[in-house]
Amino acid sequence: MSLLQLIPQPWSSLLPILFILVPLFSWIIRKGIMRSHRSIQTWSDANGYTLVSKKLNWMRLLSTGPYRWASYSQMVFNVVIVDEQKMGRSGWVRCGSYFKGCAFTDDIAGVLDTQPLSSESRWSHL
């Protein structure tokens, strides 16, 4: 008795499609995450920032950041950076374009808060 005989008949025709779509979607998601991390590091280096931390914002609609209406194919990160004056600042970075998403383009946009996180002495060791 084969595996296909154990599965009800209407569902057996979907198995080949699932064996193609599940790895394809997981590859696209992995590629988007890897490209986003690389793009954020490139963005911080190009602007003279030192990246302290980044956190992927999964609950985009409940957040108060500027990219609350980004598409689902884009990734939005909450970042903490140290600028050239050794001042810590937080902000938001959006990776990917609206239609292509983060897996197929290197578009990136960042918005930093105007107020620094703390005094200059706290970040002087960096």
Image: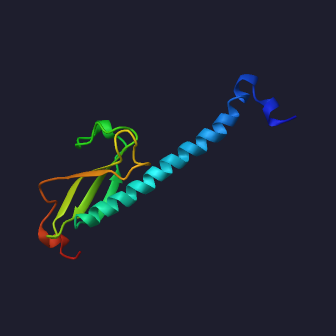
Q: Is residue 38 left or right of residue 65?
A: right
Image point (22%, 43%), residue name? 66
Query: How many circles with numbers are drawn on the protein?
Result: 0
**Quarter of the image where one finds residue 83:** bottom left
Quadrant where the image shows the C terminus: bottom left
Q: Residue furthest top?
A: 10
Q: Position of residue 67 (x, y in %)?
A: 26, 42
Residue at screen point 54% across, 43% down: 25
Up-down relation of residue 79 to residue 65 (above or below): below
Image location (x, y in percent) of residue 89: 19, 59
- In the visual, does 102 lie left or right of 63? right
For residue 80, what is the image quadrant?
A: bottom left
Where the N terminus falls, by quadrant? top right
In the image as oriented, which residue stretches furthest toward the right? 1
Name the foreground residue: 97 vs 23: 97
29 up-or-down from 80: above or below: above
Snapshot colouring: rainbow
In the rendered image, residue 69, in percent from the top left (x then y), is placed at 29, 36
Q: Is residue 17 left or right of residue 85?
A: right
Residue depicted at x 48% and y 47%: 29
Residue 62 or residue 3, whichever sits in front: 3
Residue 41 found in image quarter: bottom left
Q: Position of residue 50 (x, y in %)?
A: 26, 67
Work out which residue is located at the far bottom of the displayed protein and give it: 125
Q: Is residue 126 left or right of residue 116?
A: right
